[in-house]
Amino acid sequence: MLRRNKESRRNFSPLNLSFLDIMSCGLGAVVLIFLLIKHNVDLKDSDIENNILKDTIALNQVSEGLNNEKNILGENLINNLSEINILKTEIEKIIEETAKLKKQNNTTKSYNSDLEIEIKNKKEQSTDNIIELKGQSYRNYLTGMPVKGKRIIIALDASASMTEEKLIDIIRAKIGSDNEKINGEKWQRAIRASSWFLARLPQDSSFQFLIYNDKVSYITPKKIWHLSSDIEVISNLISSINELVPKNGTNIGNLFKEINQLNPPATDIYLITDGLPTISKNSNNNERCKRKNTVSTYCREIYFNRAKKDFLKNSPNTTFNSILLPMEGDNTAFYNFWNLSMSSGGVILSPSKDWP
């Protein structure tokens, strides 16, 4: 037995131990490599999951942003469609109104054409148009300003402002020659308006023609009523008007005073002017209106209202009508003359540049 053990110890080799060590180390290395590989795989899976989560969040954000933009675009589209519908409705209204205006314009043209033919025929047949207005651009009628009355006064403003419309042109005309004043554009319109009234005097009426600026004057004999059928008097009157030179200021109070002295009194007045008066006999009574180089609108209205009050008091049965030619800077003139015309039952007209 002992012998056998000895033999066994003799048979044991160190190489066997080394081989076992190598195998153990190899097995350990394999196990270690396996563990390392598995750990890296776990890490990679975790990174992938994180990346997927991040991408998912990013996609959700992009999707949410797109939805917001979609909603905004939808709202804008609805608003644009609403505006388009509104514009479409307005365009339809404009087209409809244009069609109506076109129809009215055609009707007016037809009416005016018939009216012109009728007036032309009446002019040829009538004997009350005792003077002729020459020139194709002159109109021989005026809607809204009938010439009527038993005793008619035509009063022409012959002040310096009647030469032109703009103030700078009026100032130039003041220092210009008499010929330049006579040929002033507005003054020529005033002369044509005077001729128009004289040509439209009713039959069986009488008339008087007054010129006023700072003073009142008669071209025909003073305070005598002339028959509207007196062709010689009217022809001489028109010739004299064409030679008048507009100058000085405007005193409408003197005009009304002169009219009030006529006997029998006037039934209708037709005034041709361009604005409120610049002179009054009592101008120095007001501290603000003492004579200066210029007259304020405030003072001109005081002068006018004073003359208006006297006129309505002394001529309660006289109808006042006025033709108001344009003048730069006299913005309250139309209202004041309109008020006087309405108070006496008359009319006022601010004509276009091509009238008469």
Image (tube, helix red, strand yellow):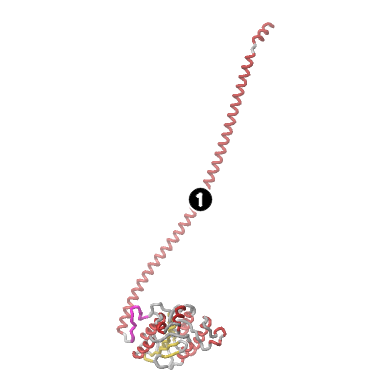
Is residue 137 shown in magenta? Answer: yes
Query: Is label 1 in a helix, a strand or a loop?
Result: helix
- Range drawn in magenta: 130-141
Q: Is residue 164 above or below residue 42?
A: below
Q: Three-letter amino acid code at disc 1?
A: Glu
Asked whether, in this view, residue 184 is left or right of residue 298, the answer is: left
Q: Position of residue 225 (x, y in %)?
A: 40, 92
* Residue nearer the viewer, 283 or 88: 283
Which image quadrant for residue 193?
A: bottom left
Q: Position of residue 185 (x, y in %)?
A: 40, 80
| Secondary structure mostly seen in the magenta stretch | loop
Residue 347 seen in the current view: no
The quadrant of the picture occupied by the C terminus is bottom left
Asked whether, in this view, residue 134 is left or right of residue 34, the answer is: left
Residue 290 seen in the current view: yes
Is residue 308 shown in magenta? Answer: no
The residue carrying mark 1 is 69
Q: Position of residue 307 (x, y in %)?
A: 50, 87
